[in-house]
Amino acid sequence: MTKTWHRPTLWLAVVMAVGAVGCAVAMVLDGRVLQGSPLWAKPFKFAVSLAVYSATLSWMLSLPHRARRWTSGAATVIAVIMFVEVGLIALQAGRGMFTHYNSSDDPLNRFVQLTFGTAIPAMFLTNVVLALVLSFQRFARPDVRLAVRSGLWLAILGMASGYLMVGPHERVPAVDAGGREVELVGGHSVGVADGGPGLPLTGWSTTGGDLRVPHFFGMHGLQVMVLLVLGLAASGLAERVRTRVVAVAALGCTGLFALLVWQALRGEPLVHPGGTTWAALGGLVVVVAAGVGLALRSGRAVPPPARQPVPQR
């Protein structure tokens, strides 16, 4: 069967790339800010992130596998929801309004919040369905199969971490880019208010915990695993060694994701980790390094096949 990339997600990647360029231009031309960041920074970041994610899904579905109708349908649903999501984020940016956590009684804003409240859980569950379908069948090489499966589940963990931002929160007064007073229910910062000092472009807090960090890392775990397996394929390592390295990397990425969630929930900035965080990270690095070392050593330890004696005439 000829490999064919999944067209809806491939087209979405193109649309998101074009949209990212448009948002970048808007950031230059539109000087409005929202919570200290350029107004168009949020749709720009979402467009770039979803362009990469949808392109990876498109490639992944080109791998020969069973139940293609299910996986193709699930990916199409994901593509449609992602398109609507970024479109609404751009719409709210154009209006100078908050996209998420916005409890304003504006009719259009109520429609946006209702759409998000319905579409985002639907996209999450569709990703789970896609991961389940691919988790119970054989496809591609063992190392590629493991990278795709672990990457999908990492992405699902990243999506799930987003619900930590919309859990029980007190209403917080804020002012949008148009000077309108609103109340926000939810937020991504822990220990500090949203909109404080942050890293360039990402805006991740430098004074408190930020749940966007694990959300981003988990969401793009799929790309990490796919790039890793493609790099290993070019290394010339044996298939069994590549598979073991991918397994160690998957466990390491899961551990790092858990560490980032833990750090954020303790109100600790990504760029100012405390001693406990450093110790946990050091332990994780040692475990992953040891695992990779054992995987590579096991490949070298396999003796070459015995030479067959040449029969004498």
Image (tube, rainbow, N blue to C red):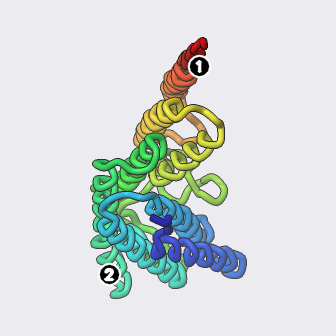
Question: Label 1 crowding class (10 Å Cα cut-off): few <14, some 14-19, many 20+?
Answer: few
Which image quarter holds the C terminus? Answer: top right
How far across and how far down the image is residue 291, in percent?
Answer: 50, 23
**In the displayed image of the protein, which residue is found farthest to the bottom?**
107
Q: Which residue is mark 2?
A: 110
Q: Which residue is mark 1?
A: 300
Task: Using the rendered image of the protein, determine whether residue 2 is visible from the camera's viewpoint.
Answer: yes
Q: Secondary structure at mark 2?
A: helix
Q: Residue at x 59, y 57 (%)?
A: 203
Which amino acid, mark 2? Arg
Q: Residue at x 32, y 72 (%)?
A: 119
Q: Are marks 1 and 2 in contact (CB under 8 Å)?
A: no
Going from the N terminus, do you reach mark 1 or mark 2 first?
A: 2
**Image quadrant in which you'd find residue 68:** bottom left
**In the displayed image of the protein, which residue is found farthest to the front?**
313
Question: Label 2 crowding class (10 Å Cα cut-off): few <14, some 14-19, many 20+?
Answer: some
Please name which of the two marks, 1 or 2, marks the residue nearer to the observer.
1
- From the viewer's side, name the closer residue of 156 and 197: 156
**Image quadrant in which you'd find residue 300:** top right
Q: Secondary structure at mark 1?
A: helix
Report the number of discs: 2
